[in-house]
Image (cartoon, coloured by chain):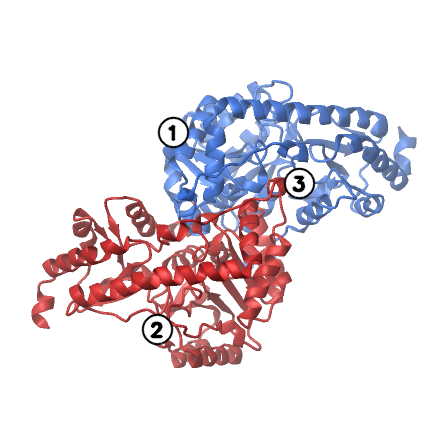
Chain colours: A red, B blue
Amino acid sequence: MYASRISRLTGSVAREILSHANNKDIISFAGGLPGPEAFEGLEVSIEGTGSFQYGPSEGDQRLRACFAKRFQEKGIDCDYSQVLITSGAQQGIDLVSKLFIEPGTHVVLEKPTYLAALQCFALFGASFESISLNADGLDVDELDEVLGSKDIRFVYLSPSFQNPSGICYKLEKRKAIAEVLDRHEAVLIEDDPYSELNYAGVATDPICSFLKRAQWVYLSTVSKILAPGLRLGCLACSEAFFPYLLKLKQASDLHSNRLSEAIVLNWLEDEAMMQARISELRSIYRAKRDVMAESLDRHFTGLADWDIPKGGLFFWLRLKSTASIRDLLQCTLERGVAFMRGDPFFPQSEIGAGYLRLNFSNPPIESIDSGLKTLGEEIRLMFPVLEKSN
Amino acid sequence: MYASRISRLTGSVAREILSHANNKDIISFAGGLPGPEAFEGLEVSIEGTGSFQYGPSEGDQRLRACFAKRFQEKGIDCDYSQVLITSGAQQGIDLVSKLFIEPGTHVVLEKPTYLAALQCFALFGASFESISLNADGLDVDELDEVLGSKDIRFVYLSPSFQNPSGICYKLEKRKAIAEVLDRHEAVLIEDDPYSELNYAGVATDPICSFLKRAQWVYLSTVSKILAPGLRLGCLACSEAFFPYLLKLKQASDLHSNRLSEAIVLNWLEDEAMMQARISELRSIYRAKRDVMAESLDRHFTGLADWDIPKGGLFFWLRLKSTASIRDLLQCTLERGVAFMRGDPFFPQSEIGAGYLRLNFSNPPIESIDSGLKTLGEEIRLMFPVLEKSN
């Protein structure tokens, strides 16, 4: 009765976890939500009746120009005619899937990768080639080999403070990847929601800013720098892709929310105000990251390995055990703590069984230590062998 | 390089026409836009920071309950757990396409049907069975025969003041169709954006309110009763469909715009305010419809046939000629008048070559007569034989 893609439809994990995040009695490290303090004093003003009518599918032209300017400042060669306003960056992923994927289409992903992209690509029938992600970025030789040996439709990368790993590709790695993509003329889908949340001033030049021949789509959003409730994202792309993505957008929801377009335009037109907000968010989240780093040292030493992320919203922990943590969440929830299992971030979920993703932006800063203490205790109870073996 | 569905991607006609509608020098009968007077005094208030955060994919629970109550009052057996908030009704069409359609899937449509549904269904690869639409609704015998002879995935109907035809199915016809759908256990997708814009008090009971066994999806929106810029729609469905549509929604854009959810909730919770607004819209649009009816008598008698719509936003004209009007739009645009060609509303566009759709809600009431005079003159110039033969 249903289309065959429905057999590939997943999605309950992230939803389940968002529902915990909204429970006030739970300390949630599970979601990827901004902290409530990020919205204090956030003002939205809507310009009169201009926002009520149907609008163009590509979005407000002034808003497209604002995004184009921001992207140019990052080194991306584009103008407003290549910019499409979307209903959150997730819609960019849906549109890219519609443009490129049919059952059996090969796409390259990072291992691990963003779970909602994985779900969307899988829904449309993609077959996955996963490439190792090291501390300095994607393994370039593996990428070169895969592109040389298989018919790959596109390469999906999130090089700046990736969700879930927090990894930020080194600048030289970005350039090397661009060179490989150019040589194979492989399409790059670059997902960049977190680059503004940069706590260490590291380079976040988009890989697509280094491309010379390869075609590309660059996905962005205001969810992390303004508010996710606005559901306002945007993509820029190679000229050849634009007419298709525009028509796909029209078929998906006609156009994006015009109130949000007007609100975001007000913000982006005032660069000083925007820069002040981003600085404030960096300082709020950097402080929370630092508290989590200290608490992890206190409660997780010997239990897991991790790096301190230089940006973004997540710590990514690898347990010193290959035991599955699928049952751990139920135990910690009973004690009022939620976290995100690592396995949904891998196309082959068994690979991710020993990983946890911990968000530091959303929980109250004063709850981070007690939450991690509880989590550490539960892990020790579940895997007593871990500590003894270290 | 692209997915094969891209070869089926259309969509330029409606976009082209919306761009004319935004040109102040054009009298546009082309779009399906509310009149600007519908937004005068429309107030939107946004409740504080509660709207900034990520939200549930299914939408705000109080808002879902408001919609469920409205649908129950229409006779639909559903509660809030069957209601999904969408980014406009168009997203409901996208989600339904994802749930049911793959290349070769047979779906039943009205002839003519809503062009953006046609585009979306075609994109996903549907094969169309079109059924004649008479003044009192769909031909029931034809429906019965098609359902009995083919493997039909769903039947897509818009029984109340359909876009483009303006036809409102008679009550007995609605019941007879429900009986046929029940007998074949065929899935009904009922699209109902216009039923509140009822200028004659005719029955608009949803067909799905009469179903006993057949499963259904009911698509609704606030675009016509509040504002399309809010991009806030909603669907209700048989319980079995809900978990799939919810996950498909999540993969499409995570959740709908929360500012719009808060604004619409404020409106729907105040039933008296909402009823007053709908009454006002009815009176604004009824007056415009009446002016258009008189102007058509004046300028189109002998040129075309039409019925006076009892609701909705459109007149649907059949020229007294089978000549194509594909070239007419360019001529009338040069004289400052836009209209919508009929052919994109048919799966086989040649059938629609002799039809025009004229919108009366958006043009200024004082421009309707002069615009139709110009349009009539251009048609006479293009098809001089028409008048002589009558």
In this orientation, which residue lies closer to the viewer: A249 or A172? A172
Name the residue type under label 3. Phe
Q: Point out the image quarter for the N terminus of chain B.
A: bottom right
In this orientation, which residue lies closer to the viewer: A130 or A231? A231
For mark 3, name the chain: B
Q: Could you tell me residue B213's position as x and y percent?
A: 41, 28
In the shown orientation, is residue B214 left or right of residue B15? left
* Residue that sits furthest to the left in the current view: A388
In this orientation, which residue lies closer to the viewer: B208 or A223? A223
Q: Could you tell me residue A25's position as x and y percent?
A: 23, 44
In the shown orientation, is residue A212 left or right of residue B57? right
Say few, some or many: other residues with alpha carbon within 10 Å of mark 3 (under 14 / 14 to 19 / 20 or more).
many
Query: Height in image: B341 above or below A378?
Result: above
Q: Are marks 1 and 3 in contact (CB under 8 Å)?
A: no
Identify the residue position indicated by label 3 in the image.
B345
Q: Residue at x 44, y 78 (%)?
A: A171
Q: Residue A331 has which mark? A: none
Q: Residue A133 has which mark? A: 2
Q: Are marks 1 and 3 on the same chain?
A: yes
Q: Are marks 2 and 1 in contact (CB under 8 Å)?
A: no
Q: Could you tell me residue A300's position as x and y percent?
A: 17, 65
Query: Height in image: B49 above or below B360?
Result: below
For mark 1, name the chain: B
Say few, some or many: other residues with alpha carbon within 10 Å of mark 1 (under 14 / 14 to 19 / 20 or more).
some
Q: Are marks 2 and 3 on the same chain?
A: no
Name the residue type under label 1. Asp
Q: Residue at x 66, y 40 (%)?
A: B345
Identify the residue position indicated by label 1 in the image.
B79
